[in-house]
Amino acid sequence: MNAVTETVAAEPVSGVEIFVPLAKLKKSPRNARKVPHGEAAIEALAASIQHKGLIQNLVVEPETKEDGTPTGNYLVTAGEGRRLAMLLRAKRKQIKKSEPVRCWLDTANDPSEISLDENVTRTPMHPADQFERFRELADGKGYGAEEIGARFGVSAGVVKQRLRLGAVSPKLLQVYREGGLTLDQLMAFAITEDHDRQEQVFANLHHNREPWIIRRDMTAANVPATDRRAVFVGTDAYVEAGGNIIRDLFSEDRGGFFEDVGLLDMLAAEKLREVAEQVQAEGWKWTEAHIDYPHAHGMRRFYPQPIALSDEDEARLEELSAEHDELAEGYSSYDEMPEDVAAKLEAVSDEIDAISAKRSAFAPTVIANGGAFVILNHDGTVRIERGFVRAEDEALADPQTEPEADGDPTEPPSGEDEQREDGEDEQEIDEEDEEPGKPISDSLSRDLSAYRTLALRVALAEQPATALIALTHTLTAQLFYSYAEAGCIEVRPTVIPLESHADGIEDTPLAARASEQHEAWAERMPRDVADLWGFIVALDDEKRTALLAHCAARTVNALRLPWDRKPRSLQTADRLAGALALDVAKDWTPTVDSYLGRVTKAHIVEAVSEGVSEDAARRIADMKKPDMAQAAEQLLAGTGWLPPALRTPQPEAEQSAPVEEAEAENVAEVDEEAPYAVAAE
């Protein structure tokens, strides 16, 4: 059929193709679509027409006046979106408004029905077909995401998502076409382009096919970018070494997943060894690099000793402190400061830190015979633990060790009895055997020391302040110097290692805080334990009490062990938690590894019911245990829920009752004794 270029009003002839100037096309009032096209749809149509021309004619009818006279314009019965796209191109100066538009003239059919028909009697392409065709454009014609996006009026990001979906295993795409997978589930499989892995995960799925479970299984052998090793090595170094990072284009992947775990471990170890070499350059005899702290090293540790600053450094430190306060005045953070002020303040802070670092140092003998561990911290930062000495080097490293004398002055002369019997009468010693300056007998020494011990007990009980010093000294000497004989109070602190009771506990932020607290005190201790008493006396009351609190805290033992029943101790631990207003939820979260994967399904349901809601618990009640534990971890995140063993009991009303009544459930665990009264706190 011949096409006609329409430039003036003519006698309408139905069923012909005509070309009408864009400016003469108008929206039909009888168009069935009342909700206008969105901007994105018009953009896509404009891009398509620009690259491929007008694929489908517009259907038009002549516009007439009330008397039936043609106006010279045409009403678009079907194709309003294409008309708007052409107008957008004209607005962008890509075409003129006089551009002829190919139309189909139809005056035989009802315009409203034609418009309705075009929008109703059509079948949209299945998304899987669309994904595969996008993939063909990329693979067959070499189009990049930007080019494809320009040809279809969508962003490059959207194109990348469709290309990734088109790269999913054909088997899974067919399952998606048949309704066996949702689009969200298909997106989860698209996290990698490994068809074998996709099909393996799909085959192992149970009735619960939540997208997050699919993503979890797809990346089970990979390392998230938030892992401490990934943070430490860095994306650039890993990729440069040939590693591949898996990106999830359909959800927040927080940096993706590192695919080659072996390569990542090797890079982390190499980088730690480089740091270890720098540390050894300080003069240490040896250094070792470990991703995890080697708890079984069995070495003695020495700490830096305080050193007085020179008068010059003290004066400079005072000057810098005043300058720091002056610069920081009026600002609460670096972000609020002008750049020049922030830079100057940072330089001053660095110099203050450098001078302050001179206040303590390791003894030269410790450095020459000791070493350091370089470890990867829980947050991906490097942790350096200095001052460890191997058993064979302890004598050389200990600054308190003195050369042994040729003889022991306490040994009796050759031929004399080394020990007299306790009942020996001192009067039976011949006077001619007595020598000037000869030490008193052991029995008399014991008698006198017993009397002095009794006197010390009475006096110490009457002077609580001195008792605080003595107790602090005894605990400190044993916890920081390993000298049990340095104190005269028979109190033995026992520090129970927790690593053997909870895997990975040493790599938690809470363990890092405990280590930092101990090291902060260790660095302040005098080098010689003989100077410890004077050090503690010189502390003010607040610091002395803080030191005692630290020492006491190191000995806390609230472990519940099947072979060590101790109901009274655990009851006291509960009371201590209440007194401290302990909130374990700040540092502990219920995860599959920490709790949910190690209890029964009933416990998991109970946890979700308490921490979230009974409805949430019912939704997961029929899942298999692994899926239930994973779902519960997601639900309980951020709720602050704790299992009963970690909760702090509510304060009880003061009461005094026998243990047998207060702890009826523990009666079988306690020796049969006379009732103990439990004093109220």
Image (cartoon, rainbow, N blue to C red):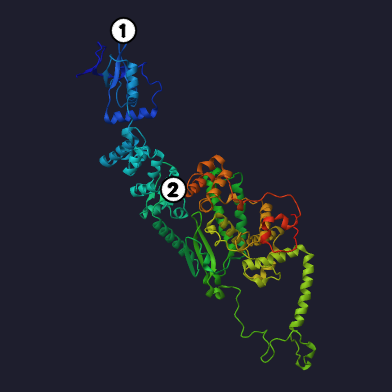
Instruction: Look at the image and tell me in which quarter the N terminus lies.
Output: top left
- Badge 1 local density, few (<14 within 10 Å), some, or many (20+)? few
Answer left or right for 169 relative to 271.
left
Counting from the top left corner in percent of width and height, residue 59 is at 29, 19
In this view of the protein, which residue sits in the foreground, 115 or 301?
115
**Name of the residue lying farthest toward the top:** 67
> Label 1 to label 2, Cα distance in Å?
69 Å
Q: Which mark is residue 216?
A: 2
Instruction: Look at the image and tell me in which quarter the C terminus lies.
Output: bottom right
Q: Earlier in the sequence, mark 1 or mark 2?
A: 1
In this view of the protein, which residue sits in the foreground, 30 or 431?
30
Tag 2: amino acid: Arg
Up-down: is 446 above or below 516?
below
Callout 1–callout 2 Cβ contact below 8 Å:
no
Answer left or right for 665 relative to 366.
right
Nearer the observer: mark 1 or 2; the answer is 2
Counting from the top left corner in percent of width and height, residue 261 is at 40, 56
**Residue found at x 49% / y 70%:** 285
| Secondary structure beneath label 2 | helix
Q: Look at the image and tell me whether residue 212 can be seen.
A: yes
- Badge 2 local density, few (<14 within 10 Å), some, or many (20+)? some
Counting from the top left corner in percent of width and height, residue 322 is at 62, 52
Counting from the top left corner in percent of width and height, residue 313 is at 60, 61
| Secondary structure beneath label 1 | loop
Q: Which residue is disc 1 drawn over?
A: 68
**Residue found at x 62% / y 66%:** 480
Please tell me in which quadrant of the rendered image residue 663 appears: bottom right
Q: Look at the image and tell me whether residue 87 can be seen.
A: no
